[in-house]
């Protein structure tokens, strides 16, 4: 019999979350280990030893390891990737610099645009040219292109991105030079745009391919070391990686295209929101994940998070669209709405209170961690306001320095000219209002109404802030699932294997060769199934979705449409017009429709997923832990509030607010004029009266 247990490891900016889950019984054991920024794998392995000890399990009991990390995203943000070169079509060496020729802040005279990952001397040009339909206009000069690459290698370039004009329509030139380069320069890492992002639009395609090349050597080294370290620990199970699209992949695919992992951790949080929402009987959920560094929101409709086909990485301004590097991959649609628990509060140049974007991270962390931090953070504010228990932080496993928190808020309060308590409330409320404001805009842009959703909170800080954010949004129902502080890791363990592929198909719908489209889909499905087989997923139980990027002829952008089972011109037109009307309320009369690209999404259940989630429980007669003063902004005062041991509550119990529910990894705050009840799956549902 194979090893039965699953181990999830999610390396975040402040903590590394680990969960061991037994799919046979549903038993789950959670551990939080401080992230080690100098070597993230070190903290992950130390946490693995501790969670195994806590679970009473042996390394050989682990049948699979599922992993998500911010390492590659941080490499982009901090510009700490490989020395990367770009080989592109003659005349297009400056595409990365020119970008879209659009300023994300029109009137900012000192605007900082995203800096290219490849400096100008390392962008070389090849003699070749394809037409938009893929026909050859200028034949590829392989020898001249190899000479350009040789110059890059002489200058120390370690990784090469190859992005030729219109290679999405014909990959022949890219594949020819890719093979020649691989044969001559065997230590050079190579990324082809026709493999990574075979889509129209030169700049986003080049940006995505370069980003992949930039982090690929780092990914290969990191994943190989992690695999070896897990084997050394005696863990026999295979390593699987969480993708930005909300699915899992084999480690070999992660090494080939690590750009797909850039949003892996947050995507797992959205997946957890969808999974817990379904278990709680909720089909429409705002999955709110707030950790130590950032807070993100994902919309879940009909039990599934929305998926987008691109996002921006390494933004110059975190909340401004257009200020980052475009990445064309399938990703759970995540909206960054605010700061995290470790975000630092400070006085702005105008004398107002600002929170973030700077974070104290894992080292030194918030002042209350007692690791040398001296600046007031969101976590310090939550502790000051009574939301957190200094004696029960991480279940009492972590000592909290309340004196350091007081000193930090004394300094902040002095700078602002207010009392320390007022400064603490200001930090908490500013963060909540920023998150609610960003969420309002994001929800409205998608044609949704917040009150139609329940807010489901995960992450260490999410349950602390969820009630107050919900009140600002006009949301009456807030859900805190079991193990919310490690929600992303739980989401990974429940994730299916998934593959998303895209192919160019630029043709008018009227008279289109839909049989050719069917053949393209068949080829994409075969490629996807080959990869799914590597993961050990239940391919027979797979779900296949056929989609298409479509627009009206003459438009500059397109929408993604779920295609009908039967590909007929009439059925496709109906599907497109329905999707278009849902976004824009009407369709232009008489306008001709065209395809731009075909997309295939294939997912299949992984062994050990689904089932139940059972966290430790205590006897129910000691559920009330006591009372402590907690500040509630709606009342504008501190109220004596009952504190409950979440592990001792029985399903069906109903508790009136205000209330605090404590578990080892997080704390759920419920305000006055509310009722909280424990659902059968272990989630707490709080509703405003």
Image: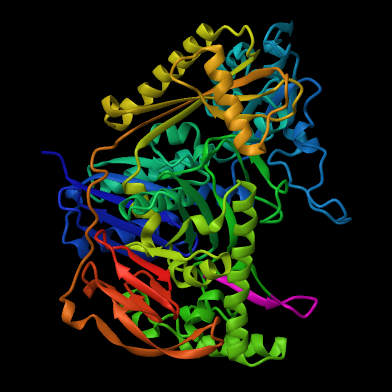
> Which corner quadrant of the image does residue 43 belong to?
bottom left
Residue drawn at x 53%, y 46% as measured from the top left: 72
> Which corner quadrant of the image does residue 677 belong to?
bottom left
Residue 189 coordinates in the image, percent (x, y): 55, 30
Residue 77 shows in the view: yes
- Nearer to me, 162 or 319: 319
Residue drawn at x 55%, y 57% as measured from the top left: 450
> Which corner quadrant of the image does residue 98 belong to?
top right
Residue 206 coordinates in the image, percent (x, y): 67, 31
Residue 520 coordinates in the image, percent (x, y): 50, 13
Residue drawn at x 73%, y 11% as measured from the top left: 131
Residue 328 coordinates in the image, percent (x, y): 60, 34
Residue 192 shows in the view: no
602 left or right of 37? left
- Nearer to me, 444 or 171: 444
Residues in magenta, as a range:
341-353
Q: Is residue 569 above or below residue 646?
A: above
Q: Residue furthest left?
A: 1
Residue drawn at x 17%, y 45% as measured from the top left: 4
- Say how the picture is coloured: rainbow
Q: Is residue 271 magenta?
A: no
Q: Is residue 526 above or below residue 460?
A: above
Q: Is residue 61 above or below residue 171?
A: below
470 left or right of 283? right
Number of dots carrying numbers: 0
């Amino acid at each position: 019999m194979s090893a039965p247990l699953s181990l999830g490891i999610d390396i975040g900016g402040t903590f590394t979350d680990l969960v061991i889950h037994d799919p046979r019984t549903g038993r789950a054991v959670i551990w939080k280990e401080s992230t080690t920024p100098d070597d993230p794998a070190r903290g992950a392995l130390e946490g693995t030893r501790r969670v195994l000890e806590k679970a009473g399990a042996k390394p050989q009991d682990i049948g699979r390891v599922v992993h998500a990390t911010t390492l590659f995203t941080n490499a982009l943000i901090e510009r700490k990737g490989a020395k990367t070169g770009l080989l592109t079509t003659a005349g297009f060496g400056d595409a990365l610099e020119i970008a879209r020729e659009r300023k994300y802040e029109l009137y900012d005279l000192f605007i900082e645009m995203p800096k290219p990952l490849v400096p100008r001397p390392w962008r070389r040009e090849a003699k070749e040219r394809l037409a938009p339909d893929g026909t050859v206009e200028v034949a590829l000069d392989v020898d001249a292109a190899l000479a350009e690459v040789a110059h890059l290698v002489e200058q120390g370039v370690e990784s090469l991105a190859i992005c030729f004009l219109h290679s999405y329509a014909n990959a022949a030139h890219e594949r020819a030079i890719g093979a020649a380069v691989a044969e001559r320069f065997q230590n050079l890492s190579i990324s082809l745009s026709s493999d990574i992002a075979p889509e129209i639009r030169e700049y986003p395609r080049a940006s995505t391919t370069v980003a992949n090349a930039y982090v690929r050597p780092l990914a290969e080294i990191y994943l190989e070391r992690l695999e070896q370290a897990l084997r050394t620990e005696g863990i026999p199970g295979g390593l699987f990686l969480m993708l930005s699209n909300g699915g899992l992949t084999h480690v070999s695919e992660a090494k080939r295209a690590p750009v797909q992992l850039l949003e892996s951790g947050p995507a797992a949080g959205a997946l957890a929101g969808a999974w817990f929402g379904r278990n709680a009987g909720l089909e429409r959920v705002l999955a709110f994940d707030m950790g130590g560094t950032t807070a993100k929101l994902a919309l879940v409709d009909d039990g599934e998070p929305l998926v987008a086909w691109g996002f921006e990485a390494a933004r110059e301004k975190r909340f401004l669209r257009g200020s980052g590097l475009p990445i064309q991959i399938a990703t759970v649609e995540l909206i960054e709405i605010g700061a995290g628990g470790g975000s630092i509060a400070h006085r702005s140049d105008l004398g107002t209170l600002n929170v973030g974007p700077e974070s104290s991270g894992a080292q030194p962390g918030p002042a209350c961690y007692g690791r040398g931090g001296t600046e007031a953070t969101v976590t310090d504010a939550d502790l000051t306001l009574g939301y957190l228990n200094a004696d029960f932080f991480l279940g009492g496993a972590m000592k909290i320095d309340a004196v350091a928190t007081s000193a930090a808020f004394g300094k902040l309060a002095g700078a602002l000219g207010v009392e320390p308590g007022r400064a603490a409330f200001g930090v908490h409320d500013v963060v909540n209002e920023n998150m609610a404001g960003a969420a309002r805009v994001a929800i409205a842009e998608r044609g949704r109404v917040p009150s139609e959703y329940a807010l489901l909170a995960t992450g260490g800080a999410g349950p602390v802030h969820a009630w107050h954010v919900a009140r600002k949004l006009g949301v009456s129902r807030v859900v805190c699932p079991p193990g919310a502080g490690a929600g992303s890791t739980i989401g990974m363990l429940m994730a299916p294997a998934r593959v998303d592929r895209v192919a160019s198909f630029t043709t008018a719908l009227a008279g289109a060769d839909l049989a050719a489209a069917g053949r393209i889909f068949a080829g994409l499905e075969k490629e996807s199934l080959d990869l799914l087989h590597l993961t050990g997923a239940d391919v027979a139980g797979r779900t296949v979705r056929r989609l298409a990027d479509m627009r009206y002829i003459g438009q500059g952008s397109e929408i993604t449409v779920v295609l009908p089972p039967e590909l007929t011109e009439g059925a496709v037109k109906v599907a497109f017009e329905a999707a278009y009307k849902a976004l824009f309320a009407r369709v232009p009369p008489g306008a001709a429709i065209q395809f731009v690209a075909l997309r295939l999404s294939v997912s299949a259940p992984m062994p050990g997923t689904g089932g139940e989630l059972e966290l430790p429980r205590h006897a129910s007669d000691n559920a009330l832990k006591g009372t402590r003063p907690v500040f509630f902004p709606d009342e504008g005062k501190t109220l004596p509030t009952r504190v409950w041991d979440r592990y001792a509550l029985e399903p069906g119990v109903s508790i009136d607010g205000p209330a605090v529910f404590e578990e080892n990894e997080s704390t759920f705050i419920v305000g006055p004029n509310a009722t909280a009840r424990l659902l059968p799956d272990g989630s707490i549902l709080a509703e405003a009266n």
